[in-house]
Amino acid sequence: MIEVKNVTKYHSGRPVLENISFRVPGGTNLGLIGPGGSGKTLLLKIICGLVEPDEGNSFIKGQQVQGLGLAELTKLRFDIGLLFQNYALFDYLNVTDNIAFPLRQAGKHSEEEILKMVQESLNKVDLPHIGHQYPNELSGGMKKRVGFARAVIPQPPIVLYDDPTAGLDPVTSSKIFLFLKAMKEERGVTSITISHDIEGIKDICDNFVLINRGRVVFYGSREEIENEKMPLVRQFWQGFSADTLG
Amino acid sequence: MSFLEKFLKMVGTKFLDWSFEIGGMVLLAWEIFRNLLPPRMDGPETWRNFYRVGVKSFPIVVVTAMLTGAIMVIQSGMYIKQYGAYGLLGWGAGYSVLREVGPIMIGLMFSGRVGANNTAELGTMRVTDQVDALRALAIDPIRYLVMPRVLAMVVMLFLLVVIGDLTALIGGALTGEALLGVDSELFAWSIINYILLEDFTHGLIKALAFGYAIALISCHFGMRTSGGAVGVGRAVNASVVTSAIAIFVIDYFITYMAA
């Protein structure tokens, strides 16, 4: 469903992603983990065509993303939901309008249906009464949940989550992880989840990719990562802080 | 590195920077043109921009234009008095306001208020991933963000110059009456008899060109912003300076061609 082949990206002549390759089979969730600044968010943007790689390609449902025209890329993006690390909510729209935005743009639902779907989404993320508020009136955790609701409301078959629980309290985090799990199990969503909350994503991801300094240092299942002997992987997976990572 | 090498490197870097910016603006102009045929833009966002750009600029334009008209009369008042040519006061103030001062003053005011605001808004959206969020939601940022702004800025600067011209003439007439004792009817008579329709349309053509230039420049710098809050500040600065230069360059060429 999602494939990344030999992706390399340079910044000021220095590689920030180097020869990255992995596959995410349909209906599975891949955990993308690694230290901060290792290129995870950049990789997510390359996968959905927001950033062009210098080498290599990404494929969504067998279709090569790079080289697509604007119309084809736009069509492809209807199938992808993206939750941004820093929420990326539209400042000038209130919460209801932010979440309703992709539905209104698609023009497939009546206004009544849209408002009903928005309210259901808000209920799911435990924010039933903030529809009239603007992003600058919300806390970081609330913004994250609104961003989450906006990313999944069009019910895309593929969702890319960039740190969905960053800044959330443990209770809300576990609710979000349960929601991610339900998205996979009930709707068969294929997803990639970036997270630093290893305990949280252990149970919701089928496979894991560990990136360090722009390179894949591990790619395998939960069982494989738990049995991996490589110090860096063990250190990251088990959260040791004795040495600096990598 | 010798002084000559350093100098050549600096010139080369500047040349490349400017080429990059001009190239970016040409590409954006092409994208705008492509989205005009047929017109593709978001309705609510277009109306929001018409309000933000036009209605909110109205008070400041009226005040500026009123004072501009008054200043033109004060400046010419000395000579009018000296030669007793009171019947030419309306023509003198009107001719300069309609052809030059009106469009330029309102254009510069518009660039400082609307253009800078536009660059800051787009720049902030860019550095906070809101532009990427639009693209990720399968929405073309040019169609959704740039087109409504360009349309609103071109139409609204045109209308603001029309209103500004009339307000400036009223300001001139009131000042003429108060300071020089020139009857408003005489002032109006002077305008009607000596000012040609072409003088008025000449200014409006400039308003259209200025509006498009300010829109193109402010959107270009906004959409190319990078580097967080510092980057937004840099983009706004570049946008305001480039818009001001563009206004005078365009004014020069339109005036030259019409001469």
Image (spheres, coloured by chain):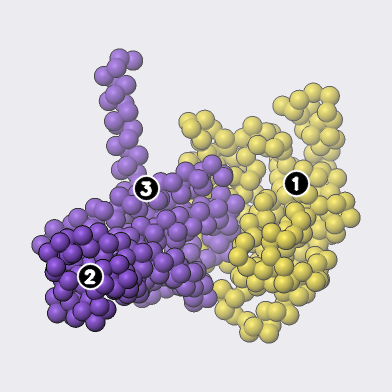
Numbered badge on residue A52 = none
Could you tell me which chain the residue with mark 2 belongs to?
B
Q: Nearer the viewer, residue A67 or B227?
A: B227
- The chain containing the residue under callout 3 comes to B
Rendered purple, the chain in question is B
Foreground mark, 2 or 1, reads 2
Q: As shown in the figure, which amino acid type bears the numbered disc 1? A: Ser
The Cα–Cα distance between marks 2 and 3, rounded to whole angstroms, is: 28 Å
Q: Distance between the Cα atoms at labels 1 and 3?
A: 43 Å
Residue position marked by numbered label 2 in the rendering: B94
Q: Position of residue B29 (x, y in %)?
A: 33, 60
Badge 2 vs badge 1, beta-carbon distance below 8 Å: no
The image quadrant that residue A199 belongs to is top right
For mark 3, does the 10 Å Cα neighbourhood hold few (<14), some (14 to 19), or many (20 or more) residues? some
Most foreground residue, A75 or A132 = A132
Counting from the top left corner in percent of width and height, residue B68 is at 32, 63
- Res A29 seen here: no
Q: Residues within 10 Å of mark 2 (few under 14, many from 20)?
A: many
Marks 2, 3: nearer the viewer: 2
- The numbered mark at residue A195 is 1
Same-chain check, marks 1 and 3:
no
Image chain in yellow: A
As drawn, the residue found furthest toward the right would be A171
Number of marks in the rendered image: 3
Residue at the disc numbered 3: B241
Residue B68 visible, this angle: yes
Q: Give me the residue at 49% from left, 41% from top.
A: A55
Q: Where residue A5 appears, x then y in whole percent? A: 56, 45
Q: Is residue B74 above or below residue B235?
A: below
The picture places residue B203, in percent across and down from the top left corner, at 24, 68
Residue for point 84% across, 30% down: A240
